[in-house]
Amino acid sequence: MSLRPVREIASSTPTVEGAGVRLRRAFGFGNTDDFDPFLLLDDFRSDRSEDYIRGFPWHPHRGIETITYILDGLIEHKDSLGNSGSLGAGDVQWMTAGSGIIHQEMPKGSRVGKMHGFQLWANLPAALKMTNPHYQDRSAGDVPEVVEDDGTKARIICGELWGRAGAVDGIAASPNYFDITVPAGLSKSIKIDVERNAFAYIFDGDASFDDASAPFGVLTEEVGASPDAPPRRASDHSLVLFDSGDEIRVNAGDHGVRFLLVSGKPIREPVAWRGPIVMNTDSELSVAFDELQRGNFLKEKSAFA
């Protein structure tokens, strides 16, 4: 076994998206190599409806998959294929935009006005950029939950953990996407395939990860930190990027910790990215936006016709 060192710890950044939704961006619109095949992770949560109620009106996607995971509140969605529905607490929507889709996502919040969820973007390889768009919608009850003897709990959205397969399958990058809770004061090791890029995003409690000794948001090798230095604690809104190895070790704080643990096999292809569209070349990107302007962006029969 080889423990994955922590390469970087950083705090998510307050951002405004859609028609005025206030959220925090863990990563995105920057260097894609470190997180390949993932492109972006947004954390949207508030108990003030004015922070999210204007939502994400009609907008296009091509060349990616968007994964929406709701913890609290409600999101209503519609798309150009004629699909509509809602996502509630614990639900997951894995949307493969492929050749192109136009949709809207409108948060409604819970009965007491709370809204909390995540949206992760995963890149599609060149061979699947123009595949037909489709969904995998999973209700909260469809997402397996495993509880270990030590009290560690995991909701398995995609991939496999502790002998259980996730709710979503058949995804190009074969990703793992877990929602993990580790009880107070417990140390827990979790295996990750050495070929994968991996990160954790903490959204409740705090923890240290073995070898997490760099100052906040600074690469360990840049500061020459001693391997014997005390580990840096990561708390709410913290993104933890791991280096190579085949397992991580998390040491939960006094109140425990809950975090997303995501890993995937890198695609290692060029990325041309503008807004909601991600292709491999600038010329492909230009074609996509030209088609959007001319009205022939959608390759599947549109409900707008």
Image (cartoon, helix red, strand yellow):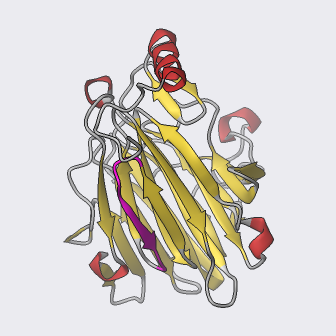
Quadrant of the rendered structure where residue 132 is? Answer: top left
Query: Residue 281, position in %: x, y?
Result: 46, 13
Is residue 6 shown to the viewer in this render? no
Query: Residue 69, position in %: x, y?
Result: 47, 66
Determine whether 120 is above or below 297 in the image: below
In what quadrant of the picture does the C terminus appear?
A: top left
Magenta run includes residue 2: no
Magenta run includes residue 84: yes
Determine whether 59 is above or below 202 in the image: above
Frontmost residue, 34 versus 184: 34
In what quadrant of the picture does the N terminus appear?
A: bottom left
**Hey, which residue is sitting farthest top in the picture?**
283
Give left or right: position of 105 versus 150.
right
**Hey, which residue is sitting farthest front in the picture?**
305
Q: Residue at x 60, y 29 (%)?
A: 31
Q: Residue at x 76, y 50 (%)?
A: 15
| Prevailing secondary structure class for the magenta stretch in the rendered image | loop
Give left or right: position of 16 versus 172.
right
Query: Residue 77, position in %: x, y?
Result: 48, 62
Quadrant of the rendered structure where residue 36 is? Answer: top left
In magenta, the rendered stretch is: 80-89
